[in-house]
Image: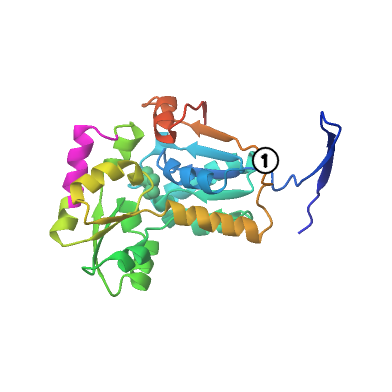
Amino acid sequence: MHQTVYNIVSVTDAGLVMSTYINPTNARPIAVFDSGVGGISVLKHIHRLLPNEHLLYVADSIHAPYGNKSATEIQARCFAIAEFLIAKDAKALVVACNTATAAAIDQMRTKYRLPIIGMEPAIKPAAAASRSGIIGVLATTGTLQSAQFAALLESYGRNVKVVTQACVGLVECVERGELSHDSTRALVKHYCQPLLDEGADSIVLGCTHYPFLKPLIQEAVGDGVVLIDTGAAVANQLKSRLFEQGLLAASNQMASVNFWSNSVSANPEKVITQLWDESVKVANF
Ligand code: DGL
């Protein structure tokens, strides 16, 4: 692949000549999106692993949840967001949403040429972590009903019993920033109980909103149950892809993180600041 490399030469106060190679392709941002704010759980892993990368994040909150939408509707949303982010010069796209990955990643990979990384419920690590041979999966209806999920079970769920639970309403709790409210705690307990009743000792957080509810989920299932989240694995996969394609940013790049949201019901700046653990500005999308 041909890339233009600029050699920037500057003179420091001490009179030293500094030479820095800047590859404009590599300085382009990584774009991350989700049906809402859940993908920020993945963005955090990416920012930790790749602190020199410029990051763009789109929360499509007005259309959340995706979990009860048709694959065609979800694909249309993914295309609209991808066009927005590609116009912002994204060098890679992370679909930080299990539901959107299941419904649209193949179509996106056909349509766009940049690297596209998706999410899928971590059945394989959960099966490896289980002693009882029974694993639970908390996810959206869309993810659990998808062909991708069926294929995952076929590949990695053969030697374990897999108990699934669709968690209608949990995405909305996170969208409202209600991470420790009594109503959220009650809903979490309600969805975890059937998995406990079946004897699950490792539980997959199959939706990127759920890591924000980890304290409540762990409280509901007890310390003996392992919770498995895919965010770190996705960040590692992204890093490998960028490395393979020679797209990693220079190690001295000062990174920026920019957020967009189309939320109308919640105060997006307040909710995103709460989830990102740092005060942020959020632009309209
Ligand atoms: N964060 C999305 C996921 O990982 C939530 C999907 C939805 O909006 O229903 O599936």
Eyeballing the image, is 278 above or below 76?
above
The total of numbered circles placed on residues is 1
Disc 1: residue Cβ within 8 A of ligand 1's nearest atom: no
Q: Secondary structure at mark 1?
A: loop
Drawn side of residue 113 relative to residue 63, left or right: right
**Residue occupying the point 58% across, 59% down:** 240
261 up-or-down from 98: above or below: above
Where does the magenta region start and end?
Answer: 179-192
Q: Is residue 250 left or right of residue 116?
A: right
Label 1 sits on residue = 253
Q: Position of residue 269 (x, y in %)?
A: 44, 26
Quadrant in which the N terminus appears: bottom right
Foreground: 12 or 127? 12
| Residue 236: percent from left, percent from top | 52, 56
At horizontal 67% and vertical 40% (from top left) the residue drawn is 253
Residue at the extreme bottom? 159
Q: Quadrant of residue 24?
A: top right
> Label 1 amino acid?
Gln
Residue at left offset 38%, top offset 39%: 64
| Magenta stretch: helix, strand or loop mostly | helix
Give the quadrant of residue 225.
Answer: bottom left
